[in-house]
């Protein structure tokens, strides 16, 4: 997600809209109140294996590893910020762009995923996404979105999209029809503000917007299986960087390399990218 330099009243209004998520004809799957007989998700332990530089001008909305390359999608538009929306490849060792394609400035870029050599990139409120060739970054087409676009991943068959609510939408990549909707829940009920997504070994890993948490979610029922807390990590490895004073510089970005079995995380405007090993 995004949010920057808005007046307090506007920020509240936008935040409420984001939490509700989706359009009026979208099934409401959020739960309210405590969910009985469901234990609090256990802590998901992890180790920081290595840190790399990351471009502090990249308002990261999506992060993907594919065919040995790192792809990043960013957000920004003149209406909301000075940041730019683009999709492209990034050199992990230096944090520099290798190749990138900018979006039209009327669109605010969001999450990305790659399925069968095609990049799928969401837009926030544009009600559409874009499709690119993963090798050349040539634009191949567009696809419709009924909801806001936040995060996206895939399970090898369906695209999986978040819209800022607790819902995960499983979309057929050929028709973009909704195959099913799963609501993310824990012991307190529905978990809203589900943002950037990554499918890892049968689970969906997801940022919760404006928190330091990454949730491990069972895609069959939406239940949170575990939760990782990354509080203080960026401050520890990037001396002098205070995420709280940066406002929008929040945790956002999860990428998994299915070949090397390495997982990477970063944040919007963060000066670091981390290789992480979950236990």
Image (cartoon, grey):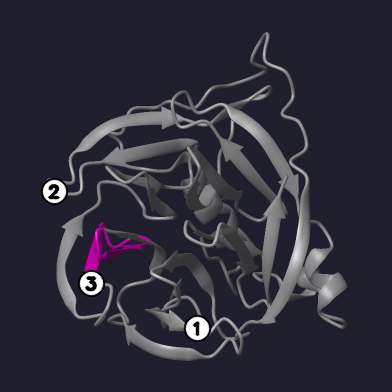
* Residue at the outermost top position: 37
Numbered tag placed on residue 174 in the rendering: 2
Up the image or down, 57 lies above or below 164; here it is below
**Residue 196 appears left or right of 28:** right
Mark 3–mark 1 CB contact (< 8 Å): no
Please say whether residue 112 is one of the residues in the magenta stretch. no
As drawn, 251 above or below 271: above
Q: Which residue is denoted by mark 3 in the rendering?
A: 132
Task: Report crowding for label 2: few under 14, some 14 to 19, many 20 or more residues within 10 A (C-alpha).
Answer: few
**Residue 139 image point, x, y percent:** 18, 76
Which badge, 3 or 2, comes first in the chain's sequence? 3
How many residues crowd mark 1 within 10 Å: few (<14), some (14–19), many (20+)?
A: some
Q: Do the residues labelled 1 and 2 touch (CB within 8 Å)?
A: no
- Residue 211 visible in rendering: no
Q: Give the range drawn in magenta.
A: 116-132
Question: How many numbered callouts?
Answer: 3
SS of the residue at dot 3? strand
Q: Position of residue 220 (x, y in %)?
A: 44, 26
Which x, y percent locates residue 1? 51, 60
Instruction: Give the mark nearer the N terminus: 1 vs 2.
Output: 1
**Considering only vertical position in the picture, is 156 above or below 139?**
above
Distance in Å between CA atoms under marks 1 and 2? 32 Å
Closer to the camera, 16 or 187?
A: 187
Residue 233 pos. (x, y %):
81, 64
* Nearest to the observer: residue 77 or residue 231: 231
Which residue appears at 61% of the width and 64% of the height? 264
Check if residue 124 falls in the magenta segment.
Answer: yes
Residue position for label 1: 83
* Real-space Cα separation, disc 3 to disc 1, in angstroms: 21 Å
């Amino acid at each position: 997600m995004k949010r920057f330099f808005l007046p307090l009243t506007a920020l509240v209004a936008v935040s409420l809209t984001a939490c509700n998520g989706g359009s009026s004809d979208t099934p409401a799957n959020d739960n309210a109140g405590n969910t009985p007989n469901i234990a609090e998700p256990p802590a998901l332990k992890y180790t920081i294996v290595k840190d790399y530089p990351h471009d502090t001008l990249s308002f990261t909305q999506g992060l993907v590893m594919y065919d040995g390359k790192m792809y990043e999608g960013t957000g920004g538009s003149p209406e909301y910020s000075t940041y730019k929306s683009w999709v492209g490849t990034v050199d992990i060792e230096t944090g520099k762009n290798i190749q990138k394609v900018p979006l039209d400035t009327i669109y605010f870029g969001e999450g990305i995923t790659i399925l069968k050599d095609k990049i799928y990139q969401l837009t926030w409120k544009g009600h559409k996404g874009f499709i690119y060739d993963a090798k050349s970054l040539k634009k191949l087409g567009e696809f419709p979105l009924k909801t806001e676009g936040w995060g996206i991943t895939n399970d090898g068959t369906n695209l999986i999209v978040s819209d800022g609510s607790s819902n995960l939408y499983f979309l057929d990549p050929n028709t973009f029809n909704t195959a099913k909707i799963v609501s993310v829940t824990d012991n307190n009920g529905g978990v809203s503000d589900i943002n950037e997504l990554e499918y890892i070994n049968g689970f969906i890993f997801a940022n919760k917007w404006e928190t330091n948490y990454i949730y491990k979610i069972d895609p069959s029922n939406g239940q949170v299986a575990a939760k990782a807390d990354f509080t203080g990590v960026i401050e520890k490895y990037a001396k002098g960087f205070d995420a709280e004073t940066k406002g929008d510089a929040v945790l956002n970005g999860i990428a998994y390399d299915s070949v090397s079995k390495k997982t990477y995380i970063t944040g919007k405007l963060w000066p670091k990218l981390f290789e992480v090993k979950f236990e």
